[in-house]
Amino acid sequence: MGVRTNTVVAEQPEAVEDRKPQADEGRSAFTPPAGVEQPPLPDLDQPTSEFAFPAGLGQAPEAPAAEPEGSAFARPSTYSAQHSPPAFTPAHGFPALTLPRDAPWQDRMRTMLRIPVSERPVPEAVQRQDESGPAVPRVLDLTLRIGELLLAGGEGAEDVEAAMFAICRSYGLDRCEPTVTFTLLSITYQPSLVDDPVTANRTVRRRGTDYTRLSAVYALVADINAEGSETTLEEAYRRLAEIRRNRHPYPGWVLTVAAGLLAGAASMLLGGGLAVFLITAAGAMLGDRLAWLCAGRGLPEFYQFAVAAVPPAALGVTVSLLHAGLKPSAVITGGLFALIPGRVLVAAVQDGLTGFYITAAARLLEVGYFFVGIVVGVLSALYVGVQLGAKLSPEAALQAEERPVVQIVAAMVLAAAFAVLLQQERSTVLFVAFSGGVAWVTYAAIAVTANGSRELATAAAAGLVGLFGQLMARYQHTSSLPYVTAAIGPLLPGSATYLGVLNIAQNNLNDGLSSLARAAALALAIAIGVNLGGEMARMFMLAPAKASARRAAKRTRGF
């Protein structure tokens, strides 16, 4: 085999040097090769545009004709600068709206809340503000704490918002928006359109009835909102702490006796005598103590109402079994008067009529639960009595004797006892007792003397109570609840409730449900009458100026 040999011949250094690329050729790939003519450089003095029409493609297209009338971009042929339509904002500007300072602060703040933000009056002069500006977090916290006490005391959502708005404006926070629902209060403050809003909220965990505390809170809000007042944040916090620490004006045993007086007076309205009065009062006081015991053990209010309704019904069944010649229906119905939640019902309907539908629905649901609890308690006792042979006749519940003097006195005692149960100030009890007597006289004149509709009579009597209560509240610069809630006590639908429960216990479901529906209608008539009376009272009082009149939402016309 032959061997193949590769021979490498070294090139001369001069040849390698001749074949090395030039510097420009080595750097750029766009350098033309040798022998190719360089293209001419562009004229920098006359730069071209990428939107220029290329040469050689003919003439540029002509401009489009004017848009025909009707196009969104065409100017109408009837337009003329000399006869242009008026602008939305007139040349002289919008008039500055102001609210009179002599009007009640509740009406002024309610007016502000019902006016859109863009149309509200100009901000008022800040009454209490340091050089560094208002303390926004502290003002919002004070506002929420006061709103919590008002809402927990049973005040309507619109009145709570008006009080919160008044406090914020008094301390210099004009661009604020309060919001109130059944258990949640929130408020938002935005210093300007370019600043971030500040929002705070507070939850109402527990609600209680103390109209003395409610009146004290209203006095604090009135002092903060008064013209020329110098109530500082520290002073407001101190007074609020005192209001929270104050004890109730009546001890527990007085409340128990008041519950017995209320039930006994209600039995006198229905034709009962002294013996019926004492039996009914004993049953109501026993039910009240059992309810207090359940509350101390942490049971919900539903079971408290059910337990409190059992003793009056059981005593009524016992009276029927003993054949003592008394009226068991008056005993049972009198006990129901002390349990029907008229306070919550009035607040629920008021919230619904003023546009706070979420709060109104929640409160009505609460009333429904309480009502069912009462029905369960009474129905349990009546069912046992029917099984034992108690002679309970539905017709006997409708036969009420006409004793005008006794019934008027009983109505006044009932209203006064109701006022004590609501923890009202002693100075308001006499006025409430008088209003309760007037309400009963109005009801009896229409329903008994004139043989009119019970619903119409109830609404008319409640309207008078609302009218007088609202006028008295504005005179005293306080809430209307202490003058209204207790005065409607004689109008509560105790008889219709007892009749419905008795028919259900005797397996007359249709009649029983019909009577319960009538009781609900009477309760709604009370609440609507109270609200209508309050609105009529505001019509006779000094109201804000016409330019900023109190507005409400327009009807939707089915939309």
Image: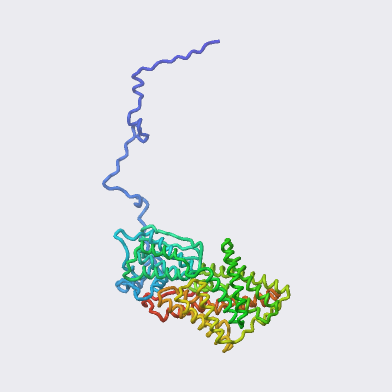
Out of 34 and 105, give the one closest to the viewer: 105
Q: Residue furthest top?
A: 1
In the shown orientation, is residue 398 left or right of residue 221?
right
Residue 418 in the image: state x and y as whole percent.
52, 75
Position above or below: 5 against 558 = above
Residue 198 in the image: state x and y as whole percent.
40, 58
Task: Give the total number of marks visible in the rendering.
Answer: 0
Residue ID at (33%, 31%): 24
Residue ID at (40%, 69%): 116
Q: Is residue 559 visible?
A: no
Residue 481 in the image: state x and y as whole percent.
47, 74
Residue 454 in the image: state x and y as whole percent.
58, 83
Q: Residue furthest bottom?
A: 450
In the shown orientation, is residue 78 left or right of residue 351?
left
In the shown orientation, is residue 485 left or right of residue 26?
right
Q: Is residue 276 visible?
A: yes
Out of 79 and 452, give the one closest to the viewer: 452
Quarter of the figure with residue 125: bottom left
Q: Which quarter of the figure is the N terminus placed in?
A: top right
In the shown orientation, is residue 136 left or right of residue 278?
left
Out of 120 and 177, give the one closest to the viewer: 177
